[in-house]
Amino acid sequence: MHAPSPGATATLIHDLRELFKLKVVGLVLVTGWGGYYLGSLHSGISRLQSGLQSGLIEALLGIGLVSAGAGALNEVIERRSDALMKRTADRPMATGRFSPARDGWPASRLSRLARCGYC
């Protein structure tokens, strides 16, 4: 096994953060947590119950996986138009650093993983 070239790991991490749109996922998770919390207050369920906390963790995990998968799928679908726009021209799919055939699988895998968690 060979060592990655200098900066290759940092570039890969940056590209994955861009592909999965982690900032957007974080905002969606905060919104999901807030909705879950407010719903538990409205329903009269104590937020200290262990069942509520495990339900919250499962909900946030599912929300995060689906949101990340949707972000990656969006990059796959929009890669051609992204390459034409100055603001989005540096995205991993638009530049060709990731290819849909080789690297488009995370989008579908994350969404399927989230779905299978509730099968």
Image (cartoon, rainbow, N blue to C red):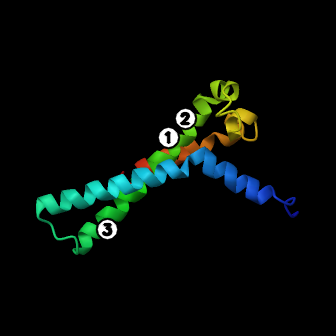
Q: Position of residue 25 (x, y in %)?
A: 48, 50
Residue for badge 1: 70
Q: Nearer the viewer, mark 1 or mark 3?
A: 1
Dots 1, 2 in contact, CB < 8 A = yes
Neighbour tally class for label 1: few under 14, some 14-19, many 20 plus, Cα within 10 Å: many
Neighbour tally class for label 3: few under 14, some 14-19, many 20 plus, Cα within 10 Å: few
Q: Quadrant of residue 4?
A: bottom right
Between 57 and 115, the one nearer to me in the picture: 57
Looking at the rendered structure, the secondary structure element under dot 3 is helix
Tell me which numbered mark, 2 or 3, is placed earlier along the sequence: 3
Question: Who's the residue at 64% across and 50% down the image?
Answer: 16
What amino acid is labelled 2 in the image?
Answer: Asn
Q: CA distance from mark 2 to mark 3?
A: 30 Å
Residue for badge 2: 74
Question: Who's the residue at 31% across and 63% down the image?
Answer: 56
Q: CA distance from mark 1 to mark 2?
A: 6 Å
Dots 2, 3 in contact, CB < 8 A = no
Q: Please identify the quadrant where the N terminus is shown.
A: bottom right
Residue for badge 3: 54
Q: Position of residue 44 (x, y in %)?
A: 11, 64
Between 97 and 81, the one nearer to me in the picture: 81
Tell me which numbered mark, 1 or 3, is placed earlier along the sequence: 3
Between 105 and 72, the one nearer to me in the picture: 72
Q: Is residue 112 visible?
A: no
Q: On the picture, is 2 further left or further right than 110?
A: right
